[in-house]
Image (tube, rainbow, N blue to C red):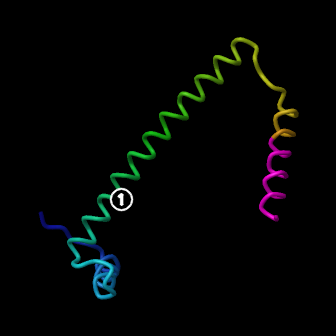
Amino acid sequence: MNITLQPELARFLSEQVEQGMFSSVEAAINESVQLLVRQKLLYKDRFEELQQEILRGVEDSERGDVIEGKVLFAQWQERLNQRRQRERG
């Protein structure tokens, strides 16, 4: 397979090889494509998780099992405040 890269990408890959990050431009491209594949799979999995969460939310709503918006935002704010306090030490 022959590919043509944009000049700035070709320079970047050459620099990576020169710095010893990869043994060759081909190795850098192979790893890049592998990362792209993993990223696509991760996004696909996350998208499916979000679809399931949305369906659960719709089902909860249809049963009347909902939280008033003001209450929900207050809960989120409290969680955020607690997380900030933990991060500060």
Q: Main secondary structure of the magenta part?
A: helix
Where in the figure is residue 5, as x and y percent of width and height?
26, 72
Q: Residue furthest bottom?
A: 18
Residue at point 80%, 57% (across, down): 86
Q: Residue furthest left?
A: 1
Instruction: Give amino acid for label 1.
Output: Leu
Front residue of this view, candidates 80 and 1: 80
Image side of residue 27 versus residue 42, left or right:
left
Q: Is residue 83 magenta?
A: yes
How many other residues sit within 10 Å of disc 1, few (<14), some (14-19) or many (≥20)?
A: few
Where in the figure is residue 76, as x and y percent of width and height?
80, 42
Q: Indicate the quadrant containing the N terminus: top left, top right, bottom left or bottom right.
A: bottom left
Where in the figure is residue 34, as x and y percent of width and height?
30, 58
Q: Which residue corresponds to mark 1?
A: 35
Image side of residue 42 versus residue 64, left or right:
left
Residue at point 45%, 39% (across, down): 45
The magenta segment = 76-89
Question: What kind of element bears circle 1?
Answer: helix
Residue at point 31%, 84% (across, down): 20
Q: Indicate the quadrant containing the C terminus: top left, top right, bottom left or bottom right.
A: bottom right
Q: Where is residue 36, by image quadrant?
A: bottom left
